[in-house]
Image: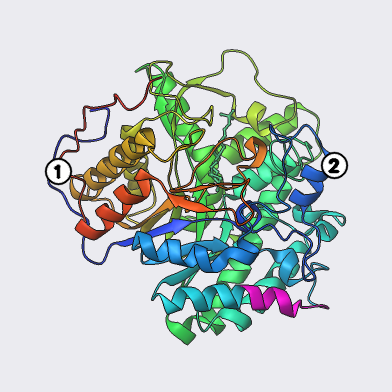
Amino acid sequence: NFSGGLKSNYTFPKDFIFGVSTAAFQIEGGWNEDGKSESIWDRLVHTNKTFVKDGSNGDVAADSYHLYKRDAEMVHELGVDVYRFSIAWSRILPTGLTNKINALGIQYYNNLIDELIKYNITPMVTIYHWDLPQKLQDIGGWTNSHIVDYYTDYAKVLFDAFGGKVKYWVTFNEPMQTCLEGYGGTYRAPALNRHGVAEYLCAHNLLKAHASVYHLFNENYRHVNKGKIGLSLDSNWAEPKEDTPQDREAAELYLKTHLGWYAHPVYSKEGDYPAELIKLVDEKSLQQNYTRSRLPKFTPEEVNYIKGTADFFGLNHYTTYLLSMAKTPVGAIPSHENDVGIVRVQDPKWPSDSSSSWLKVVPFGFRRLLKWINKTYNNVPIIVTENGYADFSGLEDKARVAYYSHYLNALLHAMHEDKVNVQGYFAWSLMDNFEWDDGYVSRFGLYLVDFKSPNKTRTAKNSAKLYASVIRTRALPANYDPEDFTAFSG
Ligand SMILES: O=S(=O)(O)CCCN1CCN(CCO[C@@H]2O[C@H](CO)[C@@H](O)[C@H](O)[C@H]2O)CC1
């Protein structure tokens, strides 16, 4: 049913990992403090005055650069096992390269990690969460093939500095946002908009960089503390718009050419890009008189080098779309959108009063996506590294309480009935923060941040109490009703 499963007394296993997530650019501030250099997000929000809805930026954000002790205390209050945060490359390596390592940057993250360990909380570090040093973008960024070495050198600095204390690593957060939206579009930094070409170059180099860091870790650092390393991919669930063969094909094609674009090379038995994506881009490139396909090819050695390079499947999930085949060409020519040729919409009947226009509440989609990943990637261990709901503000956040209850209900049914191998779940986000193009208007936090107060006061919302109780009892509240969606006015 709509909530992903009927009333049950399913529980989360004792060894199930609960966590909470944030990202450097969204919480830290201190954008140019103590030697940190400009990132592509600093550049974008400082120069494009209309990019962020409320005209804000990440200069101060939630000021976690100075308030990390309060952050660690909040993580402790929730009772989670793991805190997932990202490290800002430009705070560690101001030139982007290793010729200058910023000791004060290293010190900040050491202070945060030590604070977490004081509370017996395990750190999970996202090595890259979208904030490339601008100096590297100036020489091509993720379209420059040397970025593979630059990223590997950066990761080595982190492994050497924090490897003894950090057990979980995530190489990239949502590579599709970086490549498709940042290089192929204008929705993310660097907003290059070189659609049809740059998104494929970005993905190609990024996947090689991911594999390079996996092998570096696997050969030289894993033994230090039996650590684990993975990748966090974002995916919507894709439901056929109508129950027809064409729409079922469109839904499958969406998953293969969006999630599979990055998941297939790493997690599938055969490796490489999904055959459907290769075929579509090759054919379109030929029709458009390109001498060679706009999709770069991996050599057989590279396919093997990238295959199997993750200990877990990190999944960021929020919402669902209805898919159908495009009847006429869609998107710019050339572009990934035009190459794939499918159309996605959302059902106006779905609960939808989130402050993020794209976030509709569709819990059964979460269960189906988990099942699809489990089947497509051979029971791979999944850690849900992000899931959450956005509103405009308030401590009595009944919609967010309902969202988490329904999505955790769907997760329990995926685990207990569909036998999906899920090992952890992280809520996005610990606190209200800079929600990219939505600025501070759309709030995802379990803790409310008063951005007007000098010390950015953080206060637990009702959803923080709900999450803490699920972690403590390993179950949904007794009064949870899978049929009740009255918390959503829309
Ligand atoms: O339908 S449209 O094409 O008009 C807009 C689609 C927008 N989605 C939003 C969710 N995003 C993945 C989530 O992105 C993640 O989720 C959080 C909330 O957004 C962010 O704060 C995190 O930094 C990010 O990891 C993928 C793109």
Mark 2 or mark 1: name the one nearer the start of the chain. Answer: 2
Residue with the mark numbered 2: 47
In the picture as drawn, the residue positioned furthest to the top comes out as 327
Secondary element at image label 1: loop
Is residue 105 on the magenta stretch? yes
In the picture as drawn, the residue positioned furthest to the left comes out as 9
Secondary element at image label 2: helix
Report if the beta carbon of the residue with label 2 is closer than 8 angstroms to ligand 1: no
- State which quadrant residue 277 falls in: top right
Please state if 435 lies on the left or on the right of 246 as rendered. right
Please state if 479 lies on the left or on the right of 58 as rendered. left
Residue drawn where x is 62% and y is 58% of the image: 24
- State which quadrant residue 126 falls in: bottom right
- Callout 1 environment at 10 Å: few (<14), some (14 to 19), or many (20+)? few
Q: Give the range drawn in magenta.
A: 99-108
Residue 406 appears at what percent x and percent y? 29, 37
Residue 260 appears at what percent x and percent y? 51, 45
Residue drawn where x is 21% and y is 36% of the image: 5
